[in-house]
Image (cartoon, grey):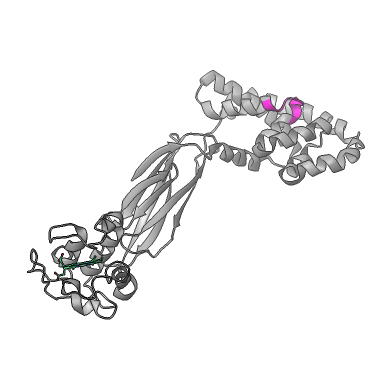
Amino acid sequence: MSKWRGMGLLWVGLAIGCGGDEAGSNDADAADTQDTAAEVQDGDATDTTPPEDTRLDVTDTATPPDATDVAPDVDDIGDVSLDIADTTQDTEDAQDTEDTADTAPLDTADTEPADTEPADTTPEDTADTTPEDTADTTVEDTTPVDTTPVNRPPTVALALSPTGPILPGQTTTLTATVSDPDGDLLDLDFVQLSPANPLGSFVTVANNKVTWTAPELATATTFEFSLSVSDGVNDAVVKTGSIQVTIPTFANDIQPIFSNNCTGCHGGSGGLFLTAGQAYTNLVNVTGNNGACSTLKRILPGSPNDSLLVRKISGTTCGDRMPRSDPSFFANNPGLITRIRSWVAAGALNN
Ligand code: HEC
């Protein structure tokens, strides 16, 4: 489980959320001016919606030239500076709003002459939208119940990488992508939903990211996760994800560990061959020569704790820790111990 608070993406979320509602309409654009002002006033009066109002103010003051045209710019946060250039030259609200996303700079250069022509559209737009909207929003403002802002829940996505299947001891990264249309501070909670046992281990690596390492298993298991995101106002938004964890196979997942770390010595050291083709028959149900643990089988299927090889890679209860040339190797790679233990727990098959 992991909890944290963060707002890295929230401002962008606000921009997207508002823009979608009101793009492409002169009336909406002009109305925004009123709405924004209304929100600010409401916010000041009640002090209940702090973050977004503050930010709207900042954006407003950053776009000085035209009070009437400032509102649509607020919606396209990333394009504020581009909008300023357009609005100082012409007041074609609807077109500019869409153009700014991609080609605002080009438009400015190319259409300067053309834009100066429609002396007609400028007065029309101004004349039409300003009075109407003022009348409309004034009416709305006088009915206070309608203008009370409704807090909306956050948008949440959960992604796993890798998506699996993975082995016991291997790790997947769970990444949350969150945004809140109201700019609320969000509280994220990652949980392993099922199975209840065994539990993998979470490590927080960023404010929207955790890793999860699969636990020791005796049977292949699908693990399900939930991500709950709360804005402190609405019910938490919950997303789920899952990953399959499989049982290691001897040839693909175990022998390579021996070949990479052990065969330099165990082409016979300690009376043990860990080379491919010989390792399995040297290990499974074979009693060790180890003085301290000579009663143990090197590998006892189903019993990792009572297998000499597992003891030799996990610590010093049976003498020197292996690999003898690098005794901290498995301490630095604990997932490989989990992998070998799982192979033993699942019956130490020769597969
Ligand atoms: C630098 C040489 C060296 C390396 C590398 C090495 N070992 Fe060993 N290993 C030994 C020696 C020597 C012994 C015998 C003494 C002892 O039991 O500690 C031994 C003993 C063992 C035993 C006990 C065998 C028995 O029947 O008593 C096991 C199991 C074992 N090693 C596993 C491994 C594994 C697994 C690796 C690789 C991850 C590994 N060793 C890497 C040198 C090495």
Q: In which quarter of the image is residue 222?
A: bottom left
Position of residue 66 measured from the top left corner of the image (x, y, whole percent): 77, 26
Lateral position of residue 160 relative to residue 167, left or right = right
Residue drawn 53% across and 38% down? 10
Can see residue 140?
Answer: no
Q: In this view, does 75 lie to the left or right of 175?
A: right
Look at the image and tell me in which quarter the C terminus lies.
bottom left
| Magenta-span inclusion, residue 187 | no
| Residue stretch in magenta | 62-69
The image shows residue 311, relative to residue 111, as above or below, that is below
On screen, residue 297 versus residue 37, left or right, reads left
Left or right: residue 121 compared with residue 86: right
Q: Can residue 285 be seen in this view?
A: yes
Say which of 144 and 124 sits in front.
124
Q: Nearer the viewer, residue 278 or 175?
A: 278
Image position, residue 57 (x, y; %): 62, 25
Residue 330 in the image, given as x and y percentages of width and height: 27, 58
Residue 117 location, x and y as percent?
92, 37
Taking the spot 39% from the left edge, 65% from the top edge, the residue there is 165
Q: Quadrant of residue 135?
A: top right
Question: Which of the pair 218/167 is nearer the observer?
Answer: 167
Where's ligand 1: which quadrant? Answer: bottom left
Residue in view at x 26 percent, y 63 percent: 217
Q: Residue at x 23, y 64 (%)?
A: 341
Identify whether 124 is placed above or below 269: above
Instruction: Tell me if residue 50 comes above or below residue 333 in the rendering.
Output: above
**How many numbered discs?**
0
